[in-house]
Amino acid sequence: MGHLLIVGTGGQGKVVLDCAKDTYQKISFMTNDLHSQGIEGYNIIYEQNISDEYILKTFDEIIVAIGNNNARLSLSLKYEIKGIKLATIIHASAVISESAQIGKGSVVFANSVINANAKIGKACIINTSTVIEHDCVLGDGVHISPNAAMGGTVNVGERTWICIGSSIANNIKIGKSSIVGAGAVVIKDVPDNVLVTGIPAQIKKRYEEK
């Protein structure tokens, strides 16, 4: 493929690079952090110094590599509205059912499994060695951390973060902008804008709705 622009030079940018570098002929980075030194061996441009027209003319696709769910989704939708093509990046070792759907701007990392009829929204992160079973639905901007697993027919609301090593039972609904803490075991529905932790997972904190 052609020239990919990765937005973000932090940890997420580095792992997206590893996932994408065998697919694209050329990769560059963009950041709004004027103190960033970028990633060795790759060109860096600063958002303040370029226009949307430059991005459209110079790059074939763009991917927002920012861990914050709100920021990643907002930027991805902004670029899409402006006509800039969002990349969908899938590591070669990931196992994706032919009937699964992966939204634009999403990344699926190494050794992840996405099974039959699962639907992944836009600008999602499906991290290393995650398991998303049949008929799951993930909203836009969701982040599934490494080694998290969900049974069949789980529904996850937009901008929610499923943290490392957590497990979600079949047929569970998890609301928008919530966090499932590391190692949690979810056996009942989770509302919007909460943090749940523990075995079984219980509400530990409520957030103001954004």
Image: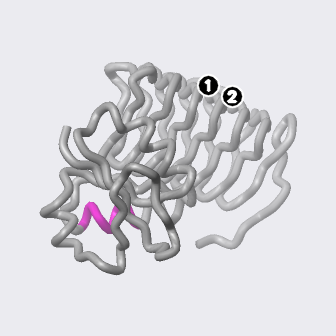
Find out whether residue 187 is within the magenta segment.
no
Classify mark 2: residues with Cα within 10 Å, few (<14), some (14-19) or many (20+). some
Pick whichever, 160 or 4, lies toward us.
4
Image location of residue 59, percent across then percent down: 20, 56
Label 1 belongs to which residue?
Answer: 151
Specify whether 130 is left or right of 38.
Answer: right
50 w.r.t. 23: above or below: below
Q: Quadrant of the N terminus?
A: top left
Amino acid carrying label 1: it is: Gly
Image location of residue 117, percent across then percent down: 40, 25
Specify whether 112 is left or right of 199.
Answer: left
Who comes first in sequence, dot 1 or dot 2?
1
Amino acid carrying label 2: it is: Ala
Work out how far the residue at label 1 is from the one at label 2, CA to CA, in angstroms: 5 Å
Q: Circle 1 sits in a helix, a strand or a loop, which is it?
A: loop
Pick whichever, 53 or 72, lies toward us.
53
Label 2 belongs to which residue?
Answer: 169
Q: Main secondary structure of the magenta part?
A: helix
Specify whether 192 is left or right of 94.
Answer: right
Find the magenta span and give its range: 75-81
